[in-house]
Structures are given as C-alpha cells and as structure tokens.
Image (cartoon, helix red, strand yellow):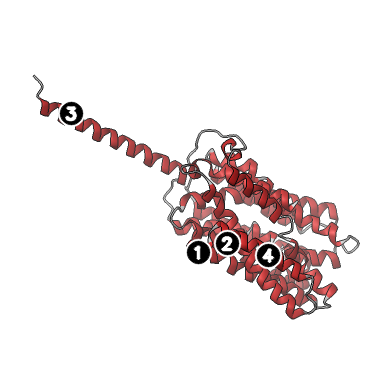
C-alpha cells in the first residue's frame, strides 16, 4: 500500500523533472536565438567590425568619388546625376534588408555573409574597369549596394541577439567601423589615384576589402544561427504596433537628407569656397572622424544616450546643422560644421540600430530580430532614395 510520504515524494520528483525539462527547452530556445558555435564575443565583434567597415564605410566614402567624377571621369554630367550613384548604393543596402531578414531568421547567416562579401569585392573590382556612367551604376551603385545589404543585416542581427546586457556598447563599437572606413578609403583613394590612376587605386581598395572580409569569415568560423520557423517578409505583429510603425516613418524622413553632406562636402568646398582638392578630400575624413565619436558615445554611456529622447534631440540637431550649413562662408566654418555633423549623424546611426530591439515586445527580440531590422532598414532605404 502506497503511503502519503511516497505520494508526496513522487509528486516532488515529477515537479523537479518538469522544471528541468522547461529549463532545457529555455536554453535550447536561447541557443537558437543567439546562435551557436565556439566563438568568443571578441571574435564576433571583430568579424562584425570589418563587415561594417566594408559596407557603410564604403558608402561614407562616396563623397571622394563624387568629387573625382565631377572633375574627371564624368565631368560632362551634372552633380545631381553623379550623386545618384551613391544614393542608389545606399538605397540598395537598406531596401535589400527586408528580403534578407527572413532568410537570416531561417539560419542562413554564414551563407549571407559569404555571398555579400563576394558581391562587394566583385563590384569594387568591376568599378576599377568602368569608363561610362551606366557602368558605374551597375558596379558601384547596384552591385556594391546589393552586396552590402546582403552582408550587413545578418551581421547586425547577430550582434543584436548575442549581446543583451551590453547591446548598445557592442553596436556602437562595430558601427564605428563605418567612420573608420569613411576615413581610410577616401584618403587611400585620393593618394593612390594621383600616383597609379583610378583603376589601380580602386583595385587596391578591393584587395583591402577582400583581406578584411577574410578576417570576418575566419572570425565567424563555425558560428551559426539555428533555423527558426519560416517567417514572412513582414512581421504582421509589428505592423499593429503604433510605436514601431511611427519609428519606420520617422526613419524615412530622417534619411531623406541624411547623406547629403557626406556626398557634397568635398564638391561644395572646391566650388563655393575655392579650397584645394586635397583639403576638400580631408574635410570628408573630418566628418567621418566626428562620426566615429558620435557612433561610440551611445555605447560608452548607454543609460544616458541610448534612449529615444536622445535620438529625437540628435535628429533635431542634425536638421539645424544642415540649415546652418547655408550660412557657412569660409573654410573654418565648414570644418566646424563637418565635425559637429559627423558627431550628430554618427549618434543617429548607432541609435537607429539600438531602437529596433528596444521597441520590440518582450520575447520578440530573438524571434523576429532579422525581420524587424529588415523592415526598419527598408523604411530607411525609402528615405535615402
């Protein structure tokens, strides 16, 4: 005959077993969300850093090409027509994200990184052979932009999902790579172009991109994101969230004029302030140096700066600075503008990424982070266009 103590002991064992199973299932879900593979956090950050270096870093360098095209390769084209190359490049990088998000959520992280890296390097190498406007559109605008969109979103999704406690710091660190790329690539192009010509200057940049992508591929190694259930291109739950949808609309408005200074500062300096071409190129580097500070600040003090209210203030400050640009009449004023706009725009870029998981409902960050980031970058891309 079973005693009451035996029954109580049996019930306790079943309860403990249930808790153990629940704990195992929770750990499995977390591994599926944040990824698996024997790679330390510093390796993930290093790999992500160089991917941003070769995606947004290349886009932030377009002002150097804008200046060169307007004086040499495309001197017969208007400045507006030339700027469409950089605009389409940035637009592709963002809009492609809406299609890449669900693919990432299904576990194809490394395939996307490898494919995007290959397309970017191929586009840079083809750019070195271009002599006509339509060729530049195909190689620099479409090919490099497409490769950037394929590689960038899964990269930022992994960092967002992997780092919970220090998410703003991690995103600020890898996002600073876009400013470093925006400093290194224009200076490299300027110095090499005068010595070896446009073709080989661009090819050398392509080899730099290939080498740094190789570091990223090695850093990610066997790291993988476990496949989750198939998802649509759009998260319908997010469409019913007023805060998230307001944010998407706001991104479209913000990025409508966001890259105008990055594209036109060198041309403005030479044509309106009569500065030398050398100084004009370095003004773009100064802007990106300010961007380096702005991208890091929200990560260094996230409790104060990584907040929606601060992003609102930074956006308003950026708009006021662009209006103040109208009043700039000498090189000293332009240097100050470049530095301040770089800081503000850098902070906006970092907070753009931080706000998506911050606005997601509890539990939805890991499950649909790729899709939600894709939706946000699609809205951003519409604004760039």
Image quadrant in which the N terminus is located: top left
Q: Quadrant of residue 353?
A: bottom right
Where is 188 relative to 14, above or below?
below
- In terms of sequence position, does the residue under pointer 2 or pointer 3 come before the other? 3
Q: Residue furthest top?
A: 1
User: Could you classify mark 1 by the number of other residues whose Cα lies within 10 Å: few (under 14), some (14-19), or many (20 or more)?
Assistant: few
**317 vs 204, nearest the viewer:** 317
- In terms of sequence position, does the residue under pointer 2 or pointer 1 come before the other? 1
Kindly state the secondary structure of the residue where label 3 is placed.
Answer: helix
Residue that mark 2 sits on: 310
- In terms of sequence position, does the residue under pointer 3 or pointer 1 come before the other? 3
3 or 1: mark nearer the eye: 1
- In terms of sequence position, does the residue under pointer 3 or pointer 4 come before the other? 3
In the shown orientation, is residue 47 left or right of residue 193?
A: left
Residue at 58% across, 64% down: 295
Q: Residue furthest right?
A: 76
Residue at 79% across, 57% down: 129
3 or 4: mark nearer the eye: 4
Residue that mark 4 sits on: 318
- In terms of sequence position, does the residue under pointer 2 or pointer 4 come before the other? 2
**320 vs 143, nearest the viewer:** 320
Where is 360 relative to 49, above or below?
above
Q: Quadrant of residue 24?
A: top left
For the question of whether residue 184 can be seen, the reply is: no
**Disc number placed over residue 10 in the picture, else none:** 3
The spot of residue 110 in percent (x, y) is 54, 46
**Disc number placed over residue 304 in the picture, else none:** 1
Circles 3 and 4 in contact, beta carbons < 8 Å: no
The spot of residue 356 in percent (x, y) is 56, 49
C-alpha span from label 3 to label 4? 66 Å
């Amino acid at each position: 005959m079973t005693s009451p103590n035996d029954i109580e002991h049996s019930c306790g064992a079943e309860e403990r077993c249930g808790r153990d199973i629940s704990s195992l299932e929770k750990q499995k879900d977390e591994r599926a969300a944040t990824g698996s593979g024997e790679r330390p956090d510093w390796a993930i950050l290093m790999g992500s850093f160089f991917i941003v270096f070769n995606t947004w870093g290349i886009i932030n360098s377009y002002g150097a090409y804008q200046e060169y095209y307007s004086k040499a390769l495309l001197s017969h084209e208007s400045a507006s027509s030339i700027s469409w190359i950089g605009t389409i490049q940035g637009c592709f990088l963002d809009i492609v994200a809406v299609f890449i998000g669900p693919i990432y959520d299904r576990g194809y992280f490394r395939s996307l990184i490898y494919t995007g890296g290959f397309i970017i390097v191929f586009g840079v190498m083809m750019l070195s052979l271009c002599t006509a406007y339509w060729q530049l559109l195909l190689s620099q605008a479409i090919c490099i932009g497409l490769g950037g969109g394929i590689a960038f979103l899964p990269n930022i999704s992994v960092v967002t999902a992997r780092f919970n406690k220090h998410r703003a710091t991690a995103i600020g660190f890898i996002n600073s790579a876009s400013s470093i790329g925006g400093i290194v690539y224009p200076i490299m192009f300027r110095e090499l172009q005068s010595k070896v010509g446009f073709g080989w200057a661009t090819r050398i940049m392509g080899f730099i991109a290939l080498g740094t992508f190789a570091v990223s591929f090695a850093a990610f190694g066997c790291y993988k994101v476990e496949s989750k259930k198939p998802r649509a291109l759009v998260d319908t739950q997010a469409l019913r969230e007023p805060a998230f949808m307001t944010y998407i609309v706001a991104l479209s408005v913000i990025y409508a004029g966001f890259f105008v200074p990055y594209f036109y500062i060198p041309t403005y300096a030479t044509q309106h302030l009569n500065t030398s071409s050398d100084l004009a190129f370095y003004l773009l580097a100064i802007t990106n140096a300010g961007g380096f500070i702005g991208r890091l600040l929200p990560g260094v003090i996230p409790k104060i700066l990584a907040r929606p209210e601060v992003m609102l203030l930074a956006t308003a400050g950026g708009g006021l600075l662009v209006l103040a640009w109208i009043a700039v009449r000498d090189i000293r004023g332009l240097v100050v503008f470049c530095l301040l706009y770089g800081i503000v725009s850098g902070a906006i870029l970092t907070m753009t990424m931080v706000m998506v998981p911050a606005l997601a409902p509890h539990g939805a960050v890991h499950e649909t982070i790729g899709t939600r980031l894709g939706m946000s970058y699609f809205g951003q891309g519409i604004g760039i266009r």
